[in-house]
Image (cartoon, rainbow, N blue to C red):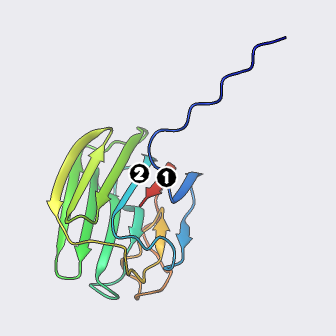
Amino acid sequence: APAPAPAPAPLDGPAPVYSLGQTDTVVTMAPEALRMEDTTLAFTFNVDNAGGTQGLFSRDARFYDGDGNHLSIYVQNGTLKVRMQDGEGQEFLDLRGIQAGQDYQVALSFGDGTGTLYVDGQEAGSTQTGLTWETSPEHIQIGALGWGSESGQASFTTAFQGEISDLAIYD
């Protein structure tokens, strides 16, 4: 008789609360989704042209509308920019040198008083921020920016030109 096959090894680490394989169009999610205090999001992107402003990920509204806890990740003229607002102020993390046609793996963690950006497995920056998604009334936009919308609205601008893949959000 053939020997039984071993059971598959369990996956290491926590399972994502949301994941998306690949998109080249804008994906939006309702504000009730993903209300979390501590958050890590990760994704890979490849931009067609690194010029102008192009949104990668956003949970944002105008100014400090809503609860004021806003996040926007975008490429602007060859710089990866992360803007985190906590209702009282805003902090930016920047990484220069983004080039068209190259894959970049991005991870951002926040909610413990610190926002930390990793690119291609290396820490690219860290800053103090009170950003949390615990009470956020804002829609999530993947592949665009919601920073011009009224609080609670799904409108977006500056769509991303390229591909976003392997997006996962962890609590």
Identify which residue, 3 or 86, lies in the foreground.
Answer: 3
Q: What residue is pinned by disc 1?
A: 167
The residue shown at (38%, 42%) is 104
Could you tell me if residue 52 is visible in this image? no
Q: Position of residue 32 (x, y in %)?
A: 51, 79
Placement of 15 over or under 60, stated as above or below: above
Amino acid type, residue under disc 1 in the picture: Leu
Tell me where residue 87 appears, x and y as whole percent.
Answer: 23, 82
Q: Earlier in the sequence, mark 1 or mark 2?
A: 2
* Secondary structure under the numbered disc 1 in the rendered image: strand
| Picture layout, residue 162 above or below residue 29 | above
Q: Is residue 147 left or right of residue 125?
A: right
Amino acid type, label 2? Ala
Residue at 47%, 71% (x, y): give it: 140
Alpha carbon distance from label 1 to label 2 = 6 Å
- Residue 56 x, y percent position in the rendering: 42, 59
Answer whether labels 1 and 2 touch (C-beta < 8 Å). yes
- In the figure, 95 relative to 136: above or below? above
Location of residue 13 in the rendering, given as x and y in whole percent from the top left corner: 44, 44
**Could you tell me which secondary element the residue under label 2 belongs to?**
strand
Q: Which residue is mark 2?
A: 42
Quarter in which the C terminus is drawn: bottom left
